[in-house]
Amino acid sequence: MSEAISIRGLRFSYGLDFELRDISLTVERGNVTTLLGPNGCGKTTLLKCMNALLTPEEGIVQLNGKDVLRMDRGELARLAGFVPQSHTPSFPYSVEDVVLMGRVSCMSIFQQPSSLDYAKADDAIEAVGLSVLKDRPYTQISGGERQLSLIARAIAQEPTALLLDEPTAHLDFKNQFTVLQMVRKVARERGMAVVMSLHDPNQAMLFSDTVALMSSGRIVSLGKPEEVIGPENIKQLYGMDTEIIVHDGRKLVMPLIWPGER
């Protein structure tokens, strides 16, 4: 696998209230890296720096060896597909049309989608298992199906990297796992470097190759899920006691808080 994302010495500040600092991270093609930590720890801010939506005060973010701040938006879109937490269009575009929007970075300003663009969009729709819904209005499908549609839109860009901001937000229990299984499948089959933010340590344990634990704007631990997700680190991040249980060879985080206890 080759290195797709490289972050070195990144620092970003909103002022006196919050600062990302000393952020260094590399992600290889086919690898899923999860940013795990509590609300306000800097996960979304870091993703925005990676996508050049925010400008770091120090350090560098590179995609395929190129500084993201030296790219125009078209070139950056061809290298990094970004999937927000949620998206609700005002017009009932079909699923295919939503995914086709991912091809805009490959077209000139007045160019109409070509047969190749439609083929790439349909291939991305098939990759996430939504072919039977491609003609359905995006506004009339489930939350999980919408999230898969946004992932397909990003895939249609044919990027090197896929950046996902809390892809399981607002989804029910089943759809959370459906989306995360698809993210890992896409990373493997398409050779994309994936960085996503999550809140659930168990989801990070199950679907990540690498986990970056974040607290107060810093990466406090980085490594394989089973190495960095443990009671001591969870206590540091969330201030709660947990234990690791093993079921069928898988490690899971069990909170030591029960209904009625204080």
Image: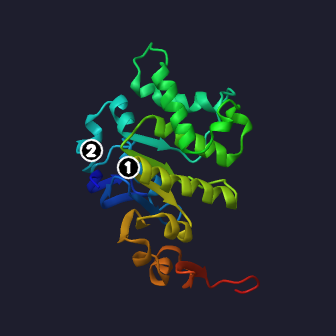
Q: Position of residue 23 (x, y in %)?
A: 31, 60
x 61%, y 60%: residue: 177
At label 1, the amino acid type is Gly
Residue 20's mark?
none
Front-most of 172 and 57?
Answer: 172
Residue closest to the far top: 110
- The residue pinned by badge 1 equals 191
Q: Amino acid at mark 2?
A: Asn
- Residue under numbered circle 2: 64
Q: Earlier in the sequence, mark 2 or mark 1?
A: 2
**Residue lying at 45% horizontally and 12% vertically, measured from the top left:** 110
- Tag 1, which secondary structure? loop
Does any portion of residue 136 appear in the rendered image? yes
Q: Is residue 255 left or right of residue 185?
A: right
Depth check: 105 or 246 in front? 246
Going by the picture, which residue comes out furthest to the right? Answer: 260
Q: Position of residue 194 (x, y in %)?
A: 42, 52
Way the structure is coloured: rainbow
Give the image location of residue 206, x and y in percent.
52, 68
**On screen, residue 138 above or below 259:** above
Q: In whole angstroms, how far apart are the C-alphas of marks 2 and 1?
A: 13 Å
Which residue lies at the image location 47% right of the left edge and 40% below the top edge? Answer: 155
Seen in the picture, residue 23 relative to 244 is either above or below; the reply is above
Residue 37 in the image: above or below residue 3: below
Instruction: Give the quadrant of the C terminus.
Output: bottom right
